[in-house]
Image: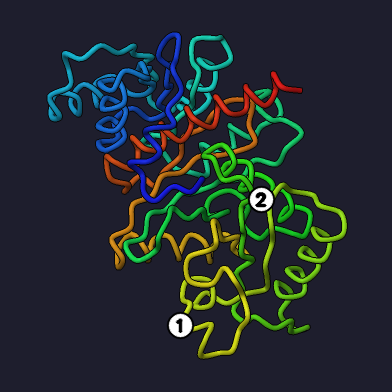
């Protein structure tokens, strides 16, 4: 199964016994609130707003949402909003954690703190799903948010998390490209050496449920014509890849922001590898992207629970 666009994702939404309680850390973010309340209107979430009550009320009134149902958890100036939101999750009063109007660094520090008990034996990494106008299906990209400069073992975890996310959306054997500046192994470019090692290990003793290809340059991933002109023999060039694994966070983050601004892409994203679903988009993300990230989290959570029950 392949997803042509985000409309296809909505057909995968599981039937819920009751809506998921989404705990928004930093509850005065404009588009976060729009996306969250849109998801409530769709019937699959209930908002739990954590943050400054006065600023939140001003924003809700501005958006015409002040009369919609929600739960408010007020934090006072100087209080750790992310920790307050996580405390709601830990108390059993929330199901999905969502980053709102606060810094990514502060949010991730509390999320990954051992004391909060939200870590698993898996590395937490971020997976984005992207709809590009000229690409025939949704494309995953990782990691653009959590791991700044992953080592070889961390790249394995990024690959595993990305493959799992794609499998949750029906991709049976995801094809993942290990992005590099060039497609030939060059010993003074460490990411090409690591890409070669990862592909060889995956072929010999698979560590993730996917197919790996790399190192491979960006144009060869996206363009069949570029592959033809460069005499690059890859059956997945120009539309066959399901995801891109970037060599580092800076590359992935720049790439997705370029897509958003210059290619008018649509994205959604979540942190994968925590005990609970974590919706995380840019604070500049559009309403639709925050809404789709909650769809992402709901589908991924249902898939994981099904996998766990099957073991």
Q: Which mark is residue 159?
A: none
Callout count: 2
Disc 1 versus disc 2: distance between alpha carbons?
29 Å
Coloring basis for residues:
rainbow
Q: Secondary structure at mark 2?
A: helix
Given the current orientation, which residue lies at the most extreme right position?
A: 204
Image coords of residue 154 (percent x, y): 73, 52
Q: Secondary structure at mark 1?
A: helix
- Tell me the quarter of the picture where residue 19 sits: top left
The front one of 145 and 208 is: 208
Q: Residues within 10 Å of mark 1 (few under 14, many from 20)?
A: some
Relative height, residue 261 to residue 190 (above, below): above
Identify which residue is drawn at 61% across, 75% down.
234
- Tell me the quarter of the picture where residue 237 sits: bottom right
In this rendering, position of residue 68 left or right of residue 52:
left
Q: Which residue is mark 2?
A: 158
Image coords of residue 198 (percent x, y): 77, 63
The front one of 233 and 151 is: 233
In this rendering, position of residue 264 left or right of residue 15:
left
Image coords of residue 192 (percent x, y): 71, 75
The front one of 27 and 179 is: 179
Identify which residue is drawn at 28% across, 45% down.
286
On the rendered image, what quadrant is the C terminus found in?
top right
Q: Which mark is residue 225?
A: 1
Give yes or no for contact between labels 1 and 2 (Cβ–Cβ under 8 Å).
no
Identify which residue is drawn at 61% across, 58% down.
175
- Judged by depth in the image, the label closer to the viewer, 1 or 2, is 1
């Amino acid at each position: 199964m392949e997803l042509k666009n985000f409309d296809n994702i909505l057909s995968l939404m599981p039937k819920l016994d009751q809506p998921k309680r989404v705990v928004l850390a930093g509850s005065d973010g404009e588009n976060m609130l729009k996306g969250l309340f849109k998801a409530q209107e769709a019937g699959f979430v209930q908002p739990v707003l954590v943050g400054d009550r006065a600023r939140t009320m001003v924003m809700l009134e501005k958006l015409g949402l002040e009369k919609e149902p929600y739960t408010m958890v007020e934090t006072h100036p100087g209080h750790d909003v992310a920790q307050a939101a996580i405390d709601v999750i830990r108390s059993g009063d929330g199901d999905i954690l969502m980053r709102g109007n606060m810094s990514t660094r502060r949010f991730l520090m509390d999320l990954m703190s051992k004391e909060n008990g939200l870590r698993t034996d898996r590395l937490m990494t971020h997976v984005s799903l992207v709809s590009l106008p000229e690409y025939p299906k949704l494309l995953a990209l990782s990691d653009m948010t959590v791991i700044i400069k992953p080592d070889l073992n961390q790249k394995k975890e990024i690959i595993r998390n990305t493959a799992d996310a794609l499998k949750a959306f029906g991709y049976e054997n995801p094809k993942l490209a290990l992005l590099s500046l060039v497609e030939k192994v060059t010993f003074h470019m460490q990411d090409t050496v690591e890409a070669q090692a990862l592909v060889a290990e995956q072929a010999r003793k698979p560590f993730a449920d996917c197919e790996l290809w790399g190192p491979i340059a960006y144009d060869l991933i996206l363009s069949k014509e570029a592959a033809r002109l460069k005499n690059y023999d890859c059956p997945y060039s120009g539309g066959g890849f399901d995801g891109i694994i970037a060599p580092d966070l800076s590359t992935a983050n720049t790439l997705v922001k370029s897509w958003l601004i210059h290619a008018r892409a649509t994205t959604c994203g979540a942190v994968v590898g925590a005990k609970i679903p974590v919706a995380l988009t840019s604070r500049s993300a559009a309403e639709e992207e925050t809404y789709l990230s909650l769809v992402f989290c709901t589908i991924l959570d249902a898939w994981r629970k099904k996998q766990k029950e099957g073991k």
